[in-house]
Amino acid sequence: MTAKHFLQLSDFERGELEYLFERTRWIKDRFKRYEAYQPLRDRTLAMVFEKASTRTRVSFEAGMNQLGGIAINLNRHDTQLSRGEPIEDLARVISRMVDVVMIRTFEQSIIERFAAHSRVPVINGLTNEYHPCQILADIYTYIEHRGSIEGKTVAWIGDSNNVCNTWLQAAAIFGFKFHVSTPPGYEVDPTFAGLRGGSHFRSFADPLAACRGAHLVTTDVWTSMGFEAENDERKRAFSDWMVDARMMAQAAPDALFMHCLPAHRGEEVAGEVIDGPQSVVWDEAENRLHAQKALLEYLVCGRVDRPDSR
Ligand code: CP
Ligand code: NVA
């Protein structure tokens, strides 16, 4: 099986990610001018969702349609997965029928097993460990607003989850500093984060200290999907880790705020921040569409050297 997959951000080299950002800009500009671009005519994306989704579902389905293809949505409950069909068999079958697959599931090992038996590219649409499509859109959004992220400082406040782990990979790839502040007991797990050496990563007990001088402050829910049983305990542990105006005041004056969404105002972020002037969360969400269209184009068609000739 030689298909190229996007299971973690670090599956791609920096040059490939930068190519995707160029393509994202080109695809987005064209979309904004209402000019059709359909390199994936007659191609099919299968989407497998084992967890809920709004943005990932809509951006992949709309994106695939806009590129001229179609998307098929599969939930655990509608498929034979719910009756114990092995993930390897699902991969063998689906990948004979479609051109690319997106999966949102639990452990990273599930998507790795799928990919190992797939004839076509597999995209991670979120696992317990990583959310690479999100960070693709987030870095693109940063570049769009502020230019290169290299050498900048990103502050992560809250849970050291799948989105945090992927930011950590991005810090090593793009060369920026990643400051993390979590409550005790919720620190970054270097194994999940794939942390190699610590030069891009610094941990802070005090969230205000983590935000000091940051060019971007970002956070995510205190309880990720699959961890709902810990919700009450987490609400107590995380109560001092809400990104509010006090934290934003520690950051650089032109710092941006991002959140992958869905957000809980009054928990991980104050309304004054997410709905305030430094927040770019709606651009961030929209860019999921454009960045994933670039990703789909790359995985199905390879590099497109002369896009205007298509
Ligand atoms: N940010 C994100 O992945 O959102 P959904 O869970 O709605 O897809
Ligand atoms: N960390 C969150 C992200 C949701 C998009 C979760 O896994 O539920």
Image (spheres, rainbow, N blue to C red):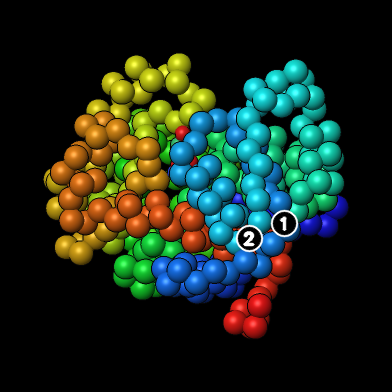
Q: Residue 123: percent from the left, percent from the top?
A: 64, 49
Q: Is residue 71 left or right of residue 28?
A: right
Q: At 69% from the left edge and 40% from the top edge, which residue is drawn?
A: 111
41 or 277: nearer the eye? Answer: 41
Q: Residue at the location (45% across, 16% down)?
A: 229
Mark carried by residue 43: 1
Mark 1 in CB contact with mark 2 (< 8 angstroms):
yes
Q: Disc 1 residue type?
A: Arg
How many numbered circles does the render carry?
2
Residue on which disc 2 sits: 68
Residue 125's quadrant in the figure? Answer: top right
Residue lying at 37% horizontally and 63% vertically, measured from the top left: 142
In the displayed structure, does residue 253 sit left or right of residue 211?
left
Q: How far apart in space, not on screen, are marks 1 and 2 (Cα)?
A: 8 Å
Query: Which SS class for mark 1?
Result: loop
Instruction: Determine the image quadrant of residue 221.
Output: top left
